[in-house]
Amino acid sequence: MMYGLCDCNNFFVSCERVFRPDLEGRPVVVLSNNDGCVVARSNEAKAIGIGMGQPYFQARGLLERHNGVVFSSNFTLYGDLSRRVMTTLRSMVEEIEVYSIDEAFFNLEGYGEPLDELGRKIRTTIRRHTGIPVSIGIAPTKTLAKIAAKLAKQYPKLGGCCYMHHEEDISKVLSRFPLKDVWGIGRRYGKAFDKMQILTAQQFVELDKQWVQGRMGITGVRTWMELRGIPSLPMDDLSASRQQITVSRSFPHEIYACGELEPIVAEFASRCGEKLRRQGSLCRTIHCFLMTNRHRPDHPQHVEETVYRFSAPTDSSLALVKEARTLLRAMYRAGYGYKKAGITLGGFEQRGSQQQALFDVPSDARHEKLMEVMDHLNRQYGHGALKTAAEGNKPFQMNREHMSRRYTTEWGELLTVKAK
């Protein structure tokens, strides 16, 4: 059994460079929603010391000194180019699992050797069809394929594809690979293992299985087995539902009035409800958080979060917006300038299989038809065509001063080519 991973290199930056070849060799960064923090960096930006997640105001001077370029997140462009990458990959292998906007696993069972040549062919074809550079990792398990893809990025002599299948080669790689960088370990376990001086993937593999299970549960055991070359994470159903949905944003400026925050939080809750219905789930809990600007220590600080549990699971935007506003009012404190808020839904149940108390009146039964109409109109005419009154008339506007054009999806923003 062999798995492959196709990982787009510095994906958001690569999307911008497809239509701006003049950016090759220059530091380029892409910012988070509302132009807050750096979420993607070119190799040149990494080399001059710009960190992932670094606030833009801290990185601005460094970029200016090195002739760097800044972009706001253009998810319309990124999503379309991601679709094109995945379509090209799907044309070359039979089974793929899209893991994220810039990563996809693929099943290589039954494909003949040499698999590294197939990997390089996939890489070349995707670059030719989409302009996006990718790295290919091939190994006996998905976790090892993730490691192989990292090596393909680090070592140019591999030609963009690392085929890692011999036991001695895998052991050699794991003996040098930081455990905290292994897919499935995470920050919390990474810190715990650092304290125990278990620093490499190979040291983790040599631990007793029962010891791992006692501290990390079945998830840790799966990672342990995967690193040993035993497939424990099969290709997943691509329609698998998320178990948590979050919509959160930083604001362009600090907001002091509760009345100004309410329509923003209401819109976040409504968007969560739309995503929830799209995957056919109901939620039991709604969580709201509110925070001031942590990068302004000269301002008074206030961070708070609270959760409400519904008596019956729901997917109604009306119910979600109502409770979101209630939670916001309970958390709000006058005199503070709030910079960020968010809504998270949890406790998911599949529609049709939910359990209810004897006398519960499910809110979705009252609102189901209305939600169907709302979703239909918003799909047809764009989000916000039909919305709750609490969201107000003015949609939340993010700060996007450095937005590029939507070259592939908007007629008015198509690339213009001039021939002399």
Image (cartoon, rainbow, N blue to C red):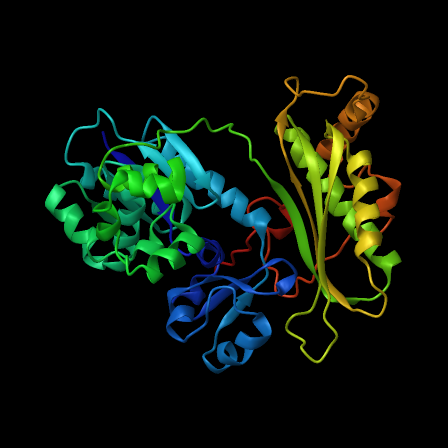
Please give the name of the residue rendered at 62% of the width and 64% of the height, measured from the top-left corner: 35
In this image, 232 relative to 371: left or right? Answer: left
Left or right: 7, with 398 as reference point: left
User: Residue 19 in the image: x percent, y percent?
Assistant: 48, 56
Work out whether residue 239 or residue 90 is closer to the camera in this orientation and state it.
239
Question: Does the rendering let one see residue 395?
Answer: no
User: Can you give x and y, in whole percent of width and height, for residue 232 in the image?
Assistant: 32, 32
Q: Is residue 234 above or below residue 51?
A: above
Does 286 sit above or below residue 298? above
Q: x, y percentage for residue 278? A: 64, 30
Left/right placement of residue 132 relative to residue 161 reads right
Q: If the image is split into quadrants, where does the N terminus sit?
A: top left
Residue 104, x across and y down, in percent? 39, 39
Determine whether 156 is above or below 323 in the image.
below
- Picture quadrant of residue 344: top right
Kindly identify the residue that appears in the image at 72 percent across and 21 percent down.
356
Does residue 337 lie above or below 124 as drawn? Answer: below
Q: Which of the 4 image quarters holds residue 116?
A: top left
Of all residues, the one furthest to the left in this rendering is 168
Is 346 or 144 nearer to us in this picture?
Answer: 346
Instruction: Tell me if residue 316 can be seen.
Output: yes
